[in-house]
């Protein structure tokens, strides 16, 4: 059931990326992909492995399949979120609230399908983490528009 959830996620996200109107250029997507993947890997290493707050795929320690998923799946989400990120701050606040709710809900689905296994983590930490991610994505959106274009 876990693999089906992951494959379905990839299919849905790839379809969205293929058909969404592109507001980001290829260099912006490429740069964002690298930055998002790096942040996810560092976060999961620190929170999941060092502090041992959760496991992915219910296996201790990093696994090759985890690495492949962590490099790609969150980056798909990040590219989609960045692509539709509003420039105006008021709209961005509502957009970030949506991202926080969506991301927390997706994480709970990942728990249901046994991709994520909490050990010391709870949903409150996730809401805070995704709020920080939204602030970072807003800054990153500004940065790439100013310096990459």
Image: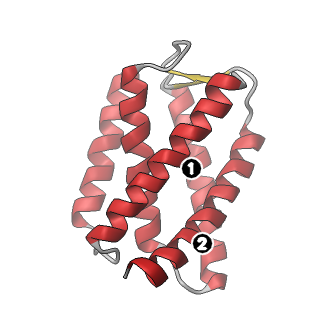
Quarter where residue 137 is shown: bottom right
Question: Across the whole image, how many numbered discs are drawn on residues?
Answer: 2
Quarter where residue 78 is shown: bottom left
What residue is rendered at 37% in x and 82% in y?
A: 149
Circle 2 residues within 10 Å: few <14, some 14–19, many ≥20: few
In this rendering, position of residue 8 left or right of residue 143: left
Q: Against 27, is 69 above or below? A: above
Q: Residue furthest front?
A: 147
For mark 1, give the secondary structure.
helix
Q: What percent of the width, then of the height, locates residue 49?
A: 62, 23
Q: Against 2, is 131 above or below? A: below
Of residues 13 and 145, the one nearer the viewer is 145
For the residues labelled 2 and 1, the Cα–Cα distance comes to 19 Å
Of residues 85 and 47, the one nearer the viewer is 47
Q: What percent of the width, then of the height, locates residue 29?
A: 34, 64
Residue on which the image places disc 1: 103
Question: Please, which colouring scheme is shown?
Answer: secondary structure
What residue is rendered at 60% in x and 81% in y?
A: 91
User: Can residue 28 be spotted in the picture?
Assistant: yes
Q: Which mark is residue 139?
A: 2
User: Can residue 1 be spotted in the picture?
Assistant: no
What residue is rendered at 40% in x and 40% in y?
A: 71
């Amino acid at each position: 059931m876990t693999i089906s959830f992951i494959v379905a996620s990839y299919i849905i996200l790839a379809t969205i990326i293929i058909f969404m109107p592109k507001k980001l250029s290829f260099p912006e997507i490429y740069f964002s992909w690298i930055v998002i993947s790096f942040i996810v890997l560092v976060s999961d290493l620190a929170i999941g492995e060092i502090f041992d707050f959760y496991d992915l795929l219910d296996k201790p320690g990093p696994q090759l399949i985890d690495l492949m998923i962590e490099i790609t799946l969150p980056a798909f989400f990040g590219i989609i979120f960045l692509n539709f990120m509003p420039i105006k701050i008021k709209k961005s606040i509502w957009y970030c609230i949506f991202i926080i709710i969506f991301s927390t809900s997706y994480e709970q689905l990942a728990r249901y399908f046994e991709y994520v296994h909490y050990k010391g983590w709870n949903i409150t930490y996730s809401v805070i983490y995704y709020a920080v991610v939204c602030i970072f994505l807003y800054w990153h959106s500004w940065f790439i528009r100013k310096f990459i274009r």
